Image: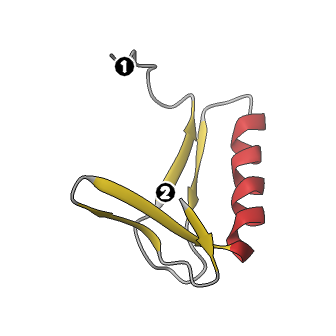
Amino acid sequence: MAVGDTGGGLAGAAGKFTWNIRHADCARFAELVDVVTQSDRPCHLYLDTATGEGLTVKVSKGEYPDHSWP
């Protein structure tokens, strides 16, 4: 993740993802993630950049089974 003035959203290349977000989006994204973490029911929200660039990031709680990653 890179925070700057221009943003650009989430982009992937060569097996690597970079999420470029604007300083102005940080507080809004933090509030949205807080809403998800405080929910007592399964839910999700999308973290879209204000400019509409890049891939959409989905924050989810309780909607998918837990996985054990090796």
**Residue 55 x, y percent position in the rendering:** 40, 66
Is the residue 22 above or below the residue 68 in the image? below
Is the residue 70 above or below the residue 2 in the image? above
Task: Rate crowding at label 2 as few (under 14), some (14 to 19) or many (20 or more) other CA atoms within 10 Å.
Answer: some
Horizontal placement of 21 versus 24: left or right? left
Q: Do the residues labelled 2 and 1 touch (CB within 8 Å)?
A: no
Is the residue 21 above or below the residue 59 in the image? below
Horizontal placement of 66 versus 29: left or right? left
Q: Distance between the residues labelled 2 and 1?
A: 21 Å
Horizontal placement of 25 versus 31: left or right? left
> For the residues carrying marks 2 and 1, which lies nearer the camera in this image?
1
The quarter of the image holding the C terminus is top left
Task: Rate crowding at label 1 as few (under 14), some (14 to 19) or many (20 or more) other CA atoms within 10 Å.
Answer: few
Q: Name the residue under label 1.
A: 69
Q: Name the residue under label 2.
A: 57
Image quadrant assignment for residue 28: bottom right
